[in-house]
Amino acid sequence: MSPKPEPRGHTPRWHLHQAVRVLRAGGIVAYPTEAVYGLGCDPLLGEAVQRLLALKQRPRGKGLILIASDWTQLQPFLLPLTPARQQRLFATWPGPHTWVLPCRPEVPQWLRGSHDSLAVRITAHPMAAALCSAWGGALVSTSANRSGLPPARSPLRVRQQFGDEIDYLLPGALGGLATPTAIRDGVTGETLRDA
């Protein structure tokens, strides 16, 4: 039996498998998200995260966002939520909403920065979600740009900013957002960054 053809306009599955191989080897992958290209790596591999922060010239104290394809991928990083908080989050997920939530004390400092919380999102972007599913967990997700430069919105812009310093570029279309996702405090509901 021959393999199923790829749907028109979709990234071939072999790109996804290659991205996962790179992540498992400790590499950094660029991939499309809701508004811009993101950079991701294994969130529990300190060397990969440190390398990503150095590429972006991003201060370690700021912390990073994790994306996931479902709630179970985020649970190992977060303190349990009240039913009311869960309801508020799940009303916005999957979708372009990033929430800052109290994290478990064992979450590495390279992820949470100088905070006792972590920014997380269950993405609705098909390629980003497929990458998390194929990887089998949450991934670091930070915009593909060096500090002070605009985020890359195309594979060409990713390559112009990072050249071969990125280990793999997963091609695909961006979502429909014009700006990166809004970030809100999951405890207070306060908006920390507008979309």
Image (cartoon, rainbow, N blue to C red):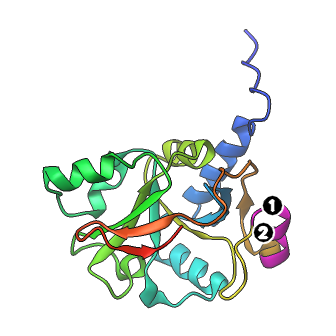
Q: Amino acid at mark 1?
A: Pro
Q: Secondary structure at mark 2?
A: helix
Q: Amino acid at mark 2?
A: Val
Q: Quick check: can you spot residue 14? A: yes
The percent coordinates of residue 127 (x first, y second) are: 62, 45
Crowd around label 1: few <14 · some 14–19 · many ≥20 (10 Å): some
State which region is magenta: 153-161
The part of the image, by quadrant, that contains residue 163 is bottom right
Q: How many marks?
A: 2
Crowd around label 2: few <14 · some 14–19 · many ≥20 (10 Å): many
Q: Is residue 174 depicted above or below 113 in this figure?
A: above
The percent coordinates of residue 183 (x first, y second) are: 43, 69
Q: Quadrant of the C terminus?
A: bottom right
Q: Quadrant of the N terminus?
A: top right
Give yes or no for contact between labels 1 and 2 (Cβ–Cβ under 8 Å). Answer: yes
The percent coordinates of residue 65 (x first, y second) are: 46, 68
Image-based side of 103 in relation to 8, left or right: left
The part of the image, by quadrant, that contains residue 164 is bottom right
Q: Main secondary structure of the magenta part?
A: helix
The percent coordinates of residue 109 (x first, y second) are: 35, 82
Q: Which residue is mark 1?
A: 155
Mark pair 1, 2: CA separation: 5 Å
Question: Which residue shows up at 31% across the image and 84% down it?
Answer: 115
Image-based side of 155 in relation to 191, left or right: right
Question: Which residue shows up at 71% across the image and 65% down it?
Answer: 167
Q: Secondary structure at mark 1?
A: helix
Residue occupying the far left of the picture? 82
Question: Which residue shows up at 55% across the image and 56% down it?
Answer: 24
Question: Which residue shows up at 17% across the image and 58% down it?
Answer: 80
Q: Which residue is mark 2?
A: 158
Reply yes or no: does residue 192 show up in magenta. no
Image-based side of 29 in relation to 111, left or right: right
